[in-house]
Image (spheres, helix red, strand yellow):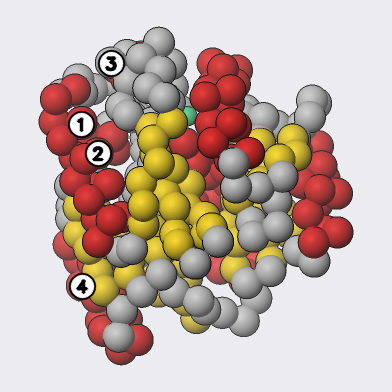
Amino acid sequence: MSRIAITRQVSRSIVHCELTHLAREPIDYARAVEQHEAYEAALVQLGCEIVRAPAAHDLPDAVFVEDVALVMDEVAVMTRPGAESRRAELPGVEPLLARYRDVVRIEAPGTLDGGDVLLVGRRFFVGRSSRTNDAGIVHLRALVSEHGYSVDAVDVRGCLHLKSAVTAVGESTLLGNGTWVDRGAFGDVAWIDVDPAEPHAANALWVGDGVIYPRAYSRTAALVRTHLDSKGMLLRLVDASELAKAEGGVTCCSLILTSG
Ligand code: CIR
């Protein structure tokens, strides 16, 4: 069995990205590309083969492939992103997923961003956010329940996506910012709180035996490291500062799936 990470190059138009909670700041394109390549290298170190979707320099947010699809062992779901400007990103990614999975789609009036979807075991938690609406959540439930997945809606406040507020750092441990999401929504699961000085520190990418994590959040990184050490897992720190200005984190830049 091999592990594939679908990624997409940073667009030259990234400066025109969607922004919801952040003020626009200059983004250094060359630095963003360099950081993205280092992120891909971290994925390779954690056992992934990189499969790049074709570059789409006219689509500012195309690098954030997580938002356009969900991939399970049984099926891939093309989402319907809440920001209209992002819907043109789908055709560049769908043919790649079709190599590995049957593909189904979230349809209008549903909207759903992959960044709002957290899978814990066979339980999907889906953020009700400015990007994901109830129709999208209901449609996702209809698409995945036949494969044995449940879907719970979770209210998100003060951040872009559910996974800005909470992600998994291993099979049964969540890393979260309890001011943006209620911890109780996730049931009886271990929880690491981000350091209060680092509200954006909840977005970590768990891949196999390791976690890719932004170097900038050093206090929370120390907490994550202690947890990972206790499980014999690796922490891979990356510089993600340029894409953070586009409101993107480490989960946003890949779609991870297994093949074979
Ligand atoms: C957007 O607002 O859609 C992009 N600028 C950032 C998307 C980040 N994606 C994610 O958190 N999954």
Left or right: 25 as drawn, with respect to 108: left
Task: Tell me the residue at 60%/47% (across/down).
Answer: 100
Could you tell me residue 111's position as x and y percent? 70, 32
Compute the Cα span from label 4 to label 1: 25 Å
Mark 4 C-beta closer than 8 Å to ligand 1: no
- SS type, badge 4: helix
Compute the Cα span from label 2 to label 1: 6 Å
Q: Which mark is residue 89?
A: none
Left or right: 73 as drawn, with respect to 18: right
**Residue to which mark 2 is pinned:** 36
- The answer to whether marks 2 and 1 mark residues whose Cβ atoms lie closer than 8 Å is yes
Left or right: 242 as drawn, with respect to 16: left
| Amino acid under disc 1 | Ala
Front position in the image: 158 or 134: 134
Could you tell me residue 180's position as x and y percent? 49, 53
**Residue to which mark 4 is pinned:** 222
10 Å neighbourhood of mark 2: few (<14), some, or many (≥20)?
A: many
In the rendered image, the vertical position of residue 156 relative to residue 188, given as above or below: above
